[in-house]
Image: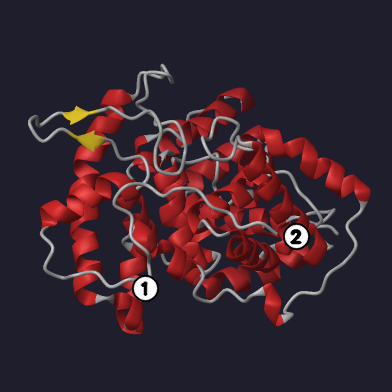
Amino acid sequence: MTAWHFTGPPGSVNSSSSVSDRRTKEEVAEEAMYVFNFYPTHSKSHKKIDFRSDVDDLGFMRPWSTLEESGCQKQYETWYASYLPIVVRRRCRWEKENPRRNSHLLQRFVRKGIPHTFRKELWLRSCPSRKDGVWQRHEVPDEVIKQIKLDLPRTFPDNKFLKTETTRKTLGRALFAVAEHIPSVGYCQGLNFVAGIILLVVNDEARAIDLLIHLVSQRQDYYGKNMIGLRRDMHVLHSLLREHCPRVIVTLEKLDVGLDMLVGKWFVCWFVESLPMETVLRLWDCMIYEGDEWLFKIAVSLFRSNMIAISSCETIDQLMTEIQNIGTSKAALYCHQLMMKSAALPITNKSIENLRVVAEKEIPE
């Protein structure tokens, strides 16, 4: 396999290199302009943000780009003005406290955001390598290969890096590796977006594929023929919403609609293509470090934040529109506040496992 590689953003540093604690907040802020996703560049001579770049460091079109014509520049400018100080403060704390070497601090620091410089290292920390023989190889059916090839050009087609022929082949090899090592999954639409994000963040083909296989293997029952794991977890989410957002459940039952139709994609793609990218990365930081509880925490938080609008729906069309609007809501955009609210919810991996046991008895095979 050829190595996945593209030139990194200005100011980025290798995660294994040491960083001086004597750098100023201004220096950290200057670096943050480049290494954190969705951040525009500040003009030093003006308090107003200078939106000069149409593409972020991961190759995505920025929401405030004039090419998007979405009219959301003011919304993102307001969010950014409140978020940048948090990013700078957290980056300084990471450099000062170095929680990567202190397990007692690490969970709290991960929940408050992993700086881009350390993200690859922490995502890969517990990830085994295919070289260790953890996963066996299996023959991949021609039909699966055909499905993968069809979805390659559909995967973030406007992304600066993923739209090239070379990187699409890399993406294809990553998805083929999942089918080769996890035959019960083969290929499922949505995994192409998951693989794309992992390749962009890890920036190393071999280790990105290791991580993709590792994470999919942990949730492989989401992707089988009958998607039993997804149906089970939609049942679990229903139980959690009944406890934390009863008005939402009343609306769902009144309209006779299931969560799998409304938000199944959230769990299949781990919220990629459903939430702003910075929010997705913050969620994945916690999901990779702590587990599936974070898929449920975020889902419940989003429903709680949009409960009034959802509970006022009178038709299925209105409901589906409101669910789609969640991804562009203020609650979804202000990721730091969303993560802190979600962290406070009494939803744990243990409670999820208990609810899964109940769900597996109630859902049909």
What mark, if any, has residue 177 been given in the picture? 2
Quadrant including the C terminus? bottom right
Q: Look at the picture and state if 285 lies above or below 20.
A: above
What type is the residue that disc 1 sits on? Gln
Give the vertical position of 1 relative to 100 (above or below): above
Q: Which residue is mark 1?
A: 107
Instruction: Label 1: state its secondary structure.
Output: helix
Marks 1 and 2: which is nearer the front?
A: 2
Of 269 and 226, the residue lying toward us: 269
Whether residue 182 can be seen here: no
Q: Is residue 80 left or right of residue 302?
A: left
Q: How many angstroms separate mark 1 from mark 2 (CA)? A: 31 Å
**Residue 189 vertical position relative to residue 184 in the rendered view, above or below:** above
Return the x and y of residue 285 as percentages of the image width and height.
Answer: 44, 61
Q: Tell me the amino acid under the disc marked 2.
A: Ala
Colouring: secondary structure
How many numbered discs, if any? 2
- Check the picture and name the quadrant holding the N terminus: bottom right
Quadrant for residue 134, please give it: bottom right
Q: Position of residue 37 (x, y in %)?
A: 37, 45
Q: Is residue 307 left or right of residue 27?
A: right
The answer to whether residue 67 is seen in the rendering is yes
Circle 2 crowding by C-alpha within 10 Å: few under 14, some 14–19, many from 20: many
Instruction: Identify the residue at image location x=83%, y=57%.
Output: 364
Residue 56 in the image, given as x and y percentages of width and height: 39, 38
Which residue of the protein is positioned furthest toward the left in this rendering? 45
Q: Tell me whether circle 1 and circle 2 mark residues in contact (CB < 8 Å).
A: no
Whole-percent x and y of residue 227? 78, 54
Residue at 82 percent across and 42 percent down: it is 147
- Would residue 232 be found to the left or right of residue 119 on screen? right
Q: Secondary structure at mark 2?
A: helix
